[in-house]
Each structure stands twice: as structure tokens, then as C-alpha cells.
């Protein structure tokens, strides 16, 4: 499952990099939660939570329906 999540994040990464940010995969938990870290401009962006929930989580859930949620870690 971790490989699937990492592959899906690779498809999202160019959109974040275009705005000076990036995403780092941290973990996929037993309760189907993806842990990520936003990097660059995305890390301090006031819209980071919207990016995570409305963008990254939505896209990952479309690709991998087993995912329960996506959460950011520091």
C-alpha cells in the first residue's frame, strides 16, 4: 500500500512544486491514514489545510479508496 501512495503522490508533486512547495510521504498507518509533510512554500501557506483535504486527500482517495484520511505532520 505504501508504494501505491508514494506513486500517487508523485502525480500530485508537480502541481505543488509549480507553486514552490512539495510533499513528503511519512507513513501509512494500520487504520488507513496517510501521514505527509508539506515542504517549501506549502509548509507555511495559510491554505495548507485546504490543499491537504481538498486536493491531496481527494486525489489519493480517488486512486486508493481504502484510504481513510490524509494528515499532515510537522
Image: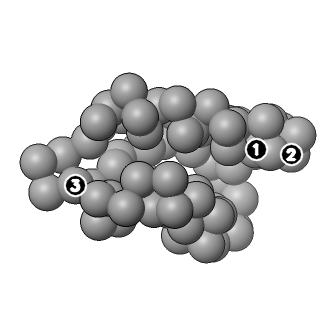
**Residue 5 image point, x, y percent:** 43, 39
Asked which quadrant contains residue 51, the reply is bottom right
Viewer-side label of 3, 1: 3
Q: Can you name the residue that lies furthest to the top here?
A: 3
Q: Which residue is mark 1?
A: 16
| Quadrant of the rendering where the N terminus is positioned | top left
Q: In screen coordinates, is 1 left or right of 65?
A: left
Kindly state the secondary structure of the residue where label 2 is placed.
loop
Task: Identify the residue at image location x=11%, y=48%.
Answer: 30
Specify whether 71 is left or right of 32.
right
Which numbered dot is residue 32?
3
| CA–CA distance in space, label 3 to label 2 | 28 Å
Placement of 2 over or under 32, stated as above or below: above
Q: Earlier in the sequence, mark 3 or mark 1?
A: 1
The reply to whether dot 2 and dot 1 touch (C-beta < 8 Å) is yes
Whether residue 40 can be seen here: yes
Residue corresponding to mark 2: 19
Label 2 and label 1: CA atoms lie apart by: 5 Å
Image point (69%, 68%), residue name: 46
Vertical placement of residue 21 versus 71, above or below = above
Q: Residue at x 52, y 31 (%)?
A: 7
Left/right placement of residue 34 relative to residue 21 reads: left
Amino acid at each position: 500500500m505504501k508504494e501505491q501512495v508514494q506513486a500517487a503522490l508523485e502525480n500530485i508533486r508537480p502541481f505543488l512544486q509549480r507553486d514552490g512547495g512539495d510533499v513528503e510521504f511519512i507513513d501509512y498507518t494500520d487504520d488507513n491514514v496517510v501521514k505527509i509533510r508539506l515542504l517549501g512554500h506549502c509548509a507555511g501557506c495559510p491554505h495548507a489545510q485546504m490543499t491537504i483535504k481538498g486536493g491531496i486527500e481527494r486525489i489519493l482517495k480517488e486512486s486508493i479508496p481504502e484510504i481513510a484520511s490524509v494528515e499532515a505532520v510537522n
